[in-house]
Amino acid sequence: MSDLTIYTLVENVRSLHNVGSIFRTADGAGVAKIFLCGITGKPPHRDIRKAALGAEEAVPWEYRPDSLEVVKQLKQQNVQIVALEAKAENLSYDEAPYRFPLCLVVGHELRGVSAHVLQKAELAVGIPMRGIKSSLNVAVAYGVALYEITKRRNQIQGIG
């Protein structure tokens, strides 16, 4: 069977509550490792723990100041880099041709994923919005996209 690993890269996410929520969602989806990059806060911190409810101790993580270096290293390991971005021209998250191993990248709450990481991404996916807002909260969007990716992984594994 192929390598069905899922990684997450969190780039410059300001809110420690968002970081905690990402940990909790990653734990639920079976993410292998989270890379915290740039200004993203890191455990141990009470605000991360408040949202993560201990998941920050269950999901392996690593802090790396330079997200582009992480992306380059993952690409050398044949990991598909998928940026989650709120741009209309992006492919819908539920129609994307995902392949594994995969790293889902989320970025700054207002600015999104950095341009230099977007340039290295194999895919940029978005979540279609129907209301007046152009995007979801980063932790919520991460959960929506990650569970679609997990669904695809489960299909490959023959799991419901």
Image (cartoon, rainbow, N blue to C red):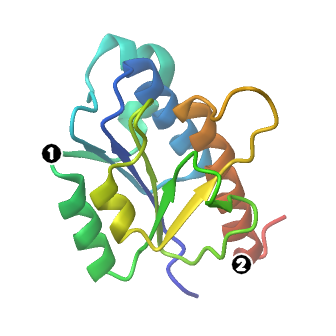
| Mark 2: secondary structure | helix
Where residue 131 sits, quadrant-wise, is top right
Q: Which of the pair 8/13 is nearer the observer?
A: 13
Where residue 56 sits, quadrant-wise, is top left
Q: CA distance from mark 2 to mark 1?
A: 34 Å
- Name the N-terminal-most of marks 2 and 1: 1
Q: Amino acid at mark 1?
A: Pro
Q: Is residue 49 left or right of residue 84?
A: left
Q: Which of the pair 91/23 is nearer the observer?
A: 91
Coordinates of residue 147 in the picture (x, y in percent): 68, 51
Coordinates of residue 17 in the picture (x, y in percent): 44, 19
Coordinates of residue 133 in the picture (x, y in percent): 68, 27
Coordinates of residue 93 in the picture (x, y in percent): 68, 58
Characterize the local packing of mark 1: few (<14), some (14-19) or many (20 or more) Cα atoms within 10 angstroms.
some
Residue in the image at 57% along x and 78% along y: 99
Residue in the image at 33% along x and 11% along y: 46
In the rendered image, which quarter contains the N terminus? bottom right
Give me the disc on residue 156: 2
Depth-wise, is mark 2 or mark 1 nearer the camera? 1
Disc 1 designates what residue?
Answer: 65
Residue 158 vs 6, above or below: the answer is: below
